[in-house]
Amino acid sequence: MNEIQQMWEALRRPEYVHVLLNPLPVYATALGVLALVFAVMARSTAAKVIALAIVLVGCLAVWPVNEYGERAEHQTEEQLDKDSRAWLHAHAGRAETFALVFYATAVLAVVTMVAVWKFPKAGGWLTAVTLVAAVVCVVLGGWISHAGGRIRHMEFRTGPPPVVSDHDDH
């Protein structure tokens, strides 16, 4: 089996797809924040819309990341030691809990895109609100990723794993 075939085979595994996609919510949303800051400074409506579209893509990327993560969770969990499972449960719990913040920010980005064209006064304050919401998403995404990176990377662990309740469904 050559490397291309191996890659195609790996794309059938949800844990592999999850690892490929999981940086998108943080990286794309962070780039959208940066672009939005520059667009506001340039006072360019077109640049604001492009930046908001980048925020939208980053926030919507949470859906496939969560979907593939959930599909991979059981099989991945079977391969882990106790500490790694605790990090997996923390990671999955955080992702599930805060996905709605990303989705709400995506909706806000769409509303803001419309507002900057149709209702410039409302578009101004909506842009500021969307910028704040996107920054919150970047921070939350970093916190979710913090736990995710510790599942298999022991070198990143600097303390005990988080306490996970016995009745947690992850």
Image (cartoon, rainbow, N blue to C red):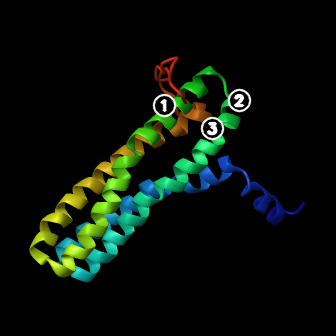
- Quick check: marks 1 and 3 in contact, CB under 8 Å? no
Q: Where residue 105 sits: x, y (%)?
A: 31, 57
The kind of residue tagged 1 is Ala
**117 displayed left or right of 6:** left
Kindly tell me whether residue 44 is visible in this rendering: no
* Cα distance between the residues tagged 1 and 3: 12 Å
For the C terminus, which image quadrant? Answer: top right
For the N terminus, which image quadrant? Answer: bottom right
- Residue holding disc 1: 90
Quick one: 99 or 128, which is closer to the camera?
99
**2 displayed left or right of 53:** right
Q: Is residue 140 above or below residue 83?
A: below
Quick one: 110 or 47, which is closer to the camera?
110
Q: Is residue 135 above or below residue 95?
A: below
- Residue in the image at 12% along x and 70% along y: 122
Q: Where residue 65 sits: x, y (%)?
A: 54, 52
- Residue holding disc 2: 78
The disc placed on residue 73 is 3
Q: Is residue 89 above or below residue 23?
A: above
Please state which of the two labelled residues, at mark 1 or mark 3, is closer to the viewer.
3
The kind of residue tagged 2 is Glu
- Residue in the image at 38% along x and 43% along y: 98
Asked which secondary structure carries label 3, the reply is helix
Kindly tell me whether residue 136 is visible in this rendering: yes
The kind of residue tagged 3 is Glu
- Disc 1 residue crowd, few under 14, some 14–19, many 20+, Cα 10 Å: many
**11 displayed left or right of 168:** right
